[in-house]
Image (cartoon, helix red, strand yellow):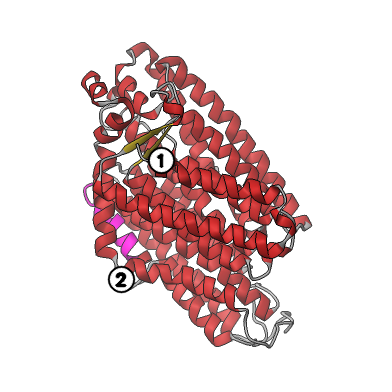
């Protein structure tokens, strides 16, 4: 049993505690601790990802209590990939925040580390109850980060965000109670063994609990009709916080992927892929709502926020098909959409600072317009799904994976139409912001050089979409094997419960 598995949870927890216990009184020391912790998490994530490619799933039993009675963390290809995605994104976001955002309120770095602890824990945990616990950790930290820097709009959006997520937490507890009442366990590997054995008379309660959990995960993933909290929350947050929140919706998507391929996967009897018939139509509508919202946006940050909603619809469309090819395609699009959404949030603030506003309206020319407009065009190409960047490859993979689906016509039509709407929305916004002059936007922008760290972080996170395109072959190879591991979770179950547990399936 490798103790490295618990480091992604322990490292940010220790760093956050040290920052709260007094290291935050010296700003240089505070930044050093935060940066060191985040860089260490990235290094550990790289090592765990390499390990996950070389060995089957591995379980970490806290206190050496055997599963399903104790707390268990599980490392497999999917959890390793999500840890790497989170730590890479966090490094870029932290570099951006060091440009000055971290000084606009207290405890930014401690909250940042607690947020990473919650997200990493959600990706590693092997049971549903501790998934709930880590959801609460990241919810509390994210609320603190969201109101960082204060502001009436931020407090109002934060209140909506908290109420929505607390409602989700209540539903979460009800759902796990229903599932536990039928199966007697909340360990996901144990659920994979016991769900197929549930009597026909209890199937209604079991499937109702599973679908109630889909509702909870749908809130996190901004799935229609539960998406309403996201545009206002992300648009009201500061740029680095909104960029970090790009991983928050992926926690919901990850939960759907993990829970419904493991506990309610191909061997779950009458409850096999119980989420599929509900997930696909909701994902398609989410895609449409997001792209229509982009067309209606009057500020760049709202444009990007609705783009996040639309991209969640696209990736969940892939997940909803529950085939190895579709899961692989959806995971590729998930990597792309995380980086591009974060990069756009950072870029929009750079534009807003230089221009004096992020209104989608004609304004004055501003210093650095050549660089920012070029970055905006590249980001728009990636997010809309035009070649040659990773958005195009991700959508192409999803379209290809949907060829054998009965809903192929709907999927192809809506992905292509919403991609066109996204292109129109970005073209309209780019032409008004960068080309047309006049209007009420005041030329308040600074004329000096742009701060180095925020600019480097913005370019760095946007460059990840180019890297995803350049290394699409190796990345897809990793994801194909990850999808196969998800669709045949015997390694996962054996790692948690032992090989004998497989005999009782």
Asked if residue 84 shows in the view, the reply is no
> What type of secondary structure mainly makes up the magenta span?
helix
Q: Disc 2 marks which residue?
A: 470
- Residue 345 image position (x, y, % from top left): 57, 65
Asked if residue 176 shows in the view, the reply is yes
Q: Toward the viewer: 251 or 3?
A: 3
Q: Is residue 490 left or right of residue 244?
A: left
> Alpha-carbon distance for marks 2 and 1?
34 Å
Q: Quadrant of residue 126?
A: top left
Question: What residue is at 45 percent from the left and 65 percent from the top?
Answer: 421
Establish if 56 lies above or below 459.
Answer: above
Question: What residue is at 33 percent from the left and 73 percent from the top?
Answer: 388
Q: Which mark is residue 3?
A: 1
Q: Can residue 401 be found in the magenta stretch?
A: yes
- Residue 295 image position (x, y, % from top left): 54, 65
Establish if 483 lies above or below 464.
Answer: above
Say whether marks 2 and 1 touch (CB < 8 Å): no
Q: Is residue 336 left or right of residue 21?
A: left
> Dot 1, how many residues are within 10 Å of its Cα: few (below 14), some (14-19), or many (20+)?
few
Establish if 470 lies above or below 307.
Answer: below
Q: Which residues are magenta?
A: 392-404
Q: Is residue 502 left or right of residue 258?
A: left
- Residue 142 image position (x, y, % from top left): 62, 48
- Residue 289 image position (x, y, % from top left): 51, 54
Tell us which disc is closer to us: 2 or 1: 1
Q: Toward the viewer: 28 or 84?
A: 28
Q: Quadrant of the N terminus?
A: top left
Q: Toward the viewer: 304 or 107?
A: 107
Question: What residue is at 65 percent from the left and 74 percent from the top?
Answer: 352
Q: Secondary structure at mark 1?
A: helix
Q: Quadrant of residue 210?
A: top left
Q: Secondary structure at mark 2?
A: helix
């Amino acid at each position: 049993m490798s103790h490295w598995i618990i480091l992604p949870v322990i490292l940010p927890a220790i760093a956050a505690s040290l920052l709260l216990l007094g290291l935050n009184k010296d700003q240089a020391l505070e930044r050093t601790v935060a940066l060191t912790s985040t860089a260490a998490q990235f290094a550990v994530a790289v090592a765990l990802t390499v390990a996950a490619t070389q060995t089957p799933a591995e379980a970490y039993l806290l206190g050496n209590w055997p599963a399903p009675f104790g707390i268990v963390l599980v490392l497999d290809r999917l959890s390793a990939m999500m840890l790497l995605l989170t730590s890479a994104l966090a490094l870029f976001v932290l570099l951006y925040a060091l440009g000055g955002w971290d000084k606009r309120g207290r405890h930014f770095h401690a909250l940042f580390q607690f947020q990473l602890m919650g997200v990493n824990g959600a990706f590693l945990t092997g049971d549903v109850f501790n998934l709930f616990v880590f959801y609460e950790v990241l919810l509390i930290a994210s609320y603190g980060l969201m109101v960082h820097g204060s502001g009436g709009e931020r407090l109002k959006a934060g209140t909506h965000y908290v109420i929505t997520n607390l409602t989700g937490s209540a539903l979460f507890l009800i759902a796990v109670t229903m599932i536990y009442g039928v199966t007697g366990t909340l360990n996901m590997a144990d659920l994979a063994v016991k769900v197929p054995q549930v009597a026909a008379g209890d199937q209604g309660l079991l499937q109702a609990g599973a679908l109630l959990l889909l509702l909870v995960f749908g809130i996190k993933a901004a799935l229609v009709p539960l998406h309403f909290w996201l545009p206002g929350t992300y648009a009201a947050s500061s740029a680095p916080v909104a960029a970090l929140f790009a991983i928050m919706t992926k926690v919901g998507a990850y939960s759907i992927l993990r829970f419904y391929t493991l506990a309610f996967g191909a061997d779950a009897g009458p409850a096999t892929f119980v989420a599929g018939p509900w997930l696909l139509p909701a994902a398609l509508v989410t895609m449409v709502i997001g792209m229509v919202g982009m067309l209606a946006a009057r500020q760049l940050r709202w444009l990007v926020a609705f783009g996040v909603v639309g991209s969640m619809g696209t990736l969940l469309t892939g997940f909803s098909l529950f085939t190895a090819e579709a899961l692989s395609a959806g995971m590729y699009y998930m990597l792309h959409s995380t980086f591009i959404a974060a990069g756009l949030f950072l870029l929009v603030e750079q534009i807003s600072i230089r221009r004096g506003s992020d209104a989608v309206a004609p304004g004055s020319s501003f210093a650095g317009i050549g660089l920012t407009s070029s970055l905006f065009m590249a980001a728009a190409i990636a997010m809309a799904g035009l070649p040659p960047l990773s958005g195009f490859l991700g959508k192409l993979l999803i379209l290809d994976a949907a060829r054998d689906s009965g809903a192929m016509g709907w999927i192809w039509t809506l992905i292509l139409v919403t991609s066109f709407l996204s292109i129109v929305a970005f073209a309209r916004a780019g032409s008004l912001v960068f080309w047309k002059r006049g209007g009420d936007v005041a030329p308040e922008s600074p004329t000096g050089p742009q701060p180095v760290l925020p600019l480097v972080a913005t370019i760095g996170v946007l460059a990840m979409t180019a890297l995803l395109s350049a290394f699409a072959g190796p990345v897809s190879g990793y994801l194909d094997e990850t999808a196969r591991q998800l669709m045949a979770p015997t390694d996962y179950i054996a790692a948690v419960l032992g090989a004998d547990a497989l005999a009782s399936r």
